[in-house]
Every structure is written in structure tokens, then in C-alpha cells.
Image: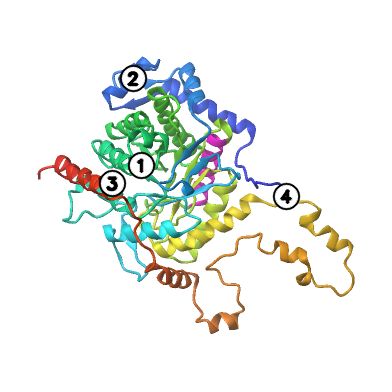
Amino acid sequence: MAKGIKAKALNEQELAFLKEKMEWLLANKGIKVEHDEVLEILAGAGAEVNGQYVKFPQAVIDKALKDVPREFTLAGVDPQYDLKFPHPEGSFYTRTNTGGMFYLSENDTYNHITLDQVAEYTRLMQALDNINYYSLPSTNPGTDFPSECIDIHTFDTVIRNTRKHGWLQPYESENVNYLIEMAAAVAGGKEELRKRPIVSLICCSVPFLTYKHMDANIILQGARAGVPLQPCSLPAAGANAPITPDGIALLACAEVMAMIIMAQLIAPGTPCVATPLLFEMDMMSTNTTQSAMSTTIGRMIAMELFQDGYGIPAHTYATGSDSPILDSQAGIEQATLAIMVALSGGSVLGGAGQIETAKTISPVQLMIDNDLFGMVRQLKAGVTVDEEHVGWNELVNLKENEAFITLDHTFNHFRDGYRSNLFTRDAKATWEGKGGKTLAERAKEAYLAMKDDLKPVSLPENVVKELDAIVARADKELKVSK
């Protein structure tokens, strides 16, 4: 078995076919950009601009692709959480779910996410070894702050509770600079943020090959500030994208590639993690889903198109379920997603802690996903096959009565694999004696045991004051009079 196990959905001819079709779309069909300054920059860099419509000649595409860095670091506030791309061990990184609106608590209450719950969830994420960075949920503003500033208040809450890297999703065009300013305050200034980007930004395409002012502004301001981008496409197969796995992957990757090209034309060398997040319309209910096997195959194709086709790190949902509860369906869908996306070569496995098609986050599910990712890391890593690992000397010298449990080989290697903290290995009688708890119940118990010990991080007083001032200014300047 090779080190770094792989499972591929495409052969070389199919990979070349999709690359050619994707680049043809960008060169001949083109995109729409609703941002005058970005259009001016693209025109100056050689793109064909006609009003808001843009085509990228092949020479422009080739030049932009050469400028995309293949090695970079998404920095943690604390350097011990730095994420180097490519992964030094050939593995992957993980992140929490973004945009989820609802919170399923450890006590099974279900509500629109509050800032207190954002803080609790972030502290849990900080404590879990197999969750590498965060993204922002969609908080309920209530009456505490203007709805126009949801992302700003959510980031303000998150950054006070973690030292890991963060993926920020601006909700308004004007909010981009406030989020960058807040990140700079924590990093130690704009130049320090450029040197060590403690956040990256998500930008999206909606509708087909169209980039609204907000998303074009994210690309513009992020690239100028030296903040890495994670350009995202969110198509739903059968609704606004082809129903087939290869069709939706082609569309999503073309939309993401257009943003990567724009970033390089604005600021060559801007780090990018390609982020096609695929969904599918269920034709019986018309509900949007994320965990159909066809969608999983589409994600594998998308990962391979970027990772193998261009050497650009790629990122997609690799856990999560369409089930609204933590049941067997959720477990099957989450495990399938994580395994297949990891083996297809994804650099980032996203969506930790989510259920209900990314609408709901759960601390109990985050506990389970942390264990799932640990197991998948072991699978992805593969094994070393040599005399030491197969126990050759022990086999050759084996006599009649030895048990391997008594041999040094067993002692030296029994810790090699990942041991789950939550999964049971007990016999039925022992399991019943411990209360006969399900996986979800054990995860809840483990979370409650650690919850009271999870504390906010300590920020310097001057940083706290600066964050307070930025948030207060945003509330005043961005609030829309009703």
C-alpha cells in the first residue's frame, strides 16, 4: 500500500477534457463583473472588457495561472496553528461550517444562532486537535446590533475565543474593509497581516459566471491587502447547474477559476484555495441537498481538476449531512464525504459540525467530526511496508507458544493508528454497564465534561480597545435607516 492513499474519479484524458472546456468558457463565453474599478483593472491587464462582460484570452489565463502561488501559509494568530500549503505530510486541513443559521445545542434546543453560542462553539473548535480553522456562522442580530453588521459582530466574537486561522465571509460590500481592519488590529498592523495573514476571505459567484459588486470587492480589497482568498462556487445540480457530477464540477470550477484569475490580475501572487461547494436539487421534493453520492463524485472531480490539473490547493464540503438530526444517516453521509474527498486529494475538508444541509451547526456533531477527521487522516496517510513494519524478524523467529501481545513489535506499533475518543470498542455487556449510550450521547457527555474549562483567549488591552472602536464605527456607518 502506497503512502498517501488516493481514489480518483478522472483519468488523464477526462482531466484534460475538463481543463480545456473550462478555459474555453472563460476565454469565449466569459463572465459578468458588477464592479467598475475591477473592470478597469482587468482591462488594463489584457482581458477583453465590454461593459460589464469580460473574456480572458488564453494568454491572460496562462499568465495568471503562473502567478498563482503553489506554496503559502494561512497563519494562525498563534504560529503553532499555522497551515502550510501544501500540507507537509501530504494530508489535509479541516474547517468548521460557514453560513449556518441555526444551532442545535447539546441539550437539543434548536434556535437561530446567538453570539453567546458563537463564542461557545468557537471555544470548542479551538480545543479540538483535528479542527484546523474556523469560518463564520450566520448570527441572529436580534436587537443587539444592526443586521447590516452580522459578519462584523460575529468575527468580533470569534476572534476573542480562538488563536487559529479564520475564513471570513463578508455579508455586505462595505463590510470587507472593516473585517480586514479588525484582522490587522489582531495581527499587529496591516503589514503584519500581509506577512502573516491570520484570516482569508470567501468570495462567491451568483448567478452563473456572475460576480456581484460585493464579491468583486472582496477579491479587490483582499488581494490588495495581501489576504488569501478562498473563491467559492455554490451551484445546485439540476437547479442552476447541470445535473451530472462532471457537469456541475465543470461549472463550479470555471466560476472559481475566474475569481482566481481576477485575483492574480489585481495582485499577482495572491494565495488562493479553490473552493467549489456543490449541492444538488432533489427532484422529488425540490429541496437543496449536499450529501447525494452524485454530489460526492462531483466534489471529487472538482478536487482533482484543481489539485491534479493545476497544482492549486482545493477545498470543499467533506462532512455534513442532509439529515436534520444526529442519526445513522448523518453518520453514513459524513463518513462517506470525508473519506472520498480526502482520498481524491482535497487540501481542505470543510463543513465540520454541520447537519441539515449546512443550515445547522451542532457542538455534539463537531465533537464527532473531530474524531472522524482523525480516522480519515490515518486512512489518507497509508502505511509503510518494510521488514520492521510487517514484523519480519518476529515472524522468522516465531516459536510455538509466543503471543504477539508479549512482543516488542506490538508495543512499538500499537499506538501508530488513531484511537477514537468517542467510538466504543466494548462488548455489549460492558457497553450496557456503562449506560448503553449512543455515539451522540457519548459525544454530548464528552462535550459537557470539557465545556466549563473552555475559556476565551486573552487579547492585549490595546487590541481589545481597537476592536471595540472598529465595531462601534461599523455599527454607526453601516446601519441603514428603516
Identify the residue position indicated by label 4 in the image: 1
Question: Where is residue 326 drawn, in percent x and y?
Answer: 44, 65
What range is drawn magenta here? 292-307
Q: How is the image coloured?
A: rainbow
Question: Which callout, 4 or 1, points to the residue nearer the camera?
Answer: 1
Q: Residue at x 27, y 53 (%)?
A: 139
Question: Where is residue 158 drawn, in percent x and y?
Answer: 33, 52
Work out how far the residue at label 3 is from the one at label 2, CA to CA, in angstroms.
Answer: 34 Å
Query: In the figure, 304 relative to 419: above or below?
Result: above
Identify the residue position indicated by label 3 in the image: 463
Q: Is residue 298 magenta?
A: yes
Element type at mark 2? helix
Residue 463 vs residue 405: left or right?
left
Query: In the figure, 87 relative to 428: above or below?
Result: above
Q: Residue at x 27, y 57 (%)?
A: 115
Question: Which callout, 3 or 2, points to the residue nearer the camera?
Answer: 3
Q: Earlier in the sequence, mark 4 or mark 3?
A: 4
Label 1 is placed on what type of residue?
Answer: Ala
Q: Are marks 2 and 4 in contact (CB under 8 Å)?
A: no
Q: Residue at x 48, y 42 (%)?
A: 315
Q: Quick one: 56 or 70, which is closer to the camera?
A: 70
Identify the residue position indicated by label 1 in the image: 187
Q: Earlier in the sequence, mark 4 or mark 1?
A: 4
Identify the residue position indicated by label 2 in the image: 41
Element type at mark 4? loop
Q: Earlier in the sequence, mark 2 or mark 4?
A: 4
Residue 24 vs residue 157: left or right?
right
Q: Quick one: 266 or 172, which is closer to the camera?
A: 266
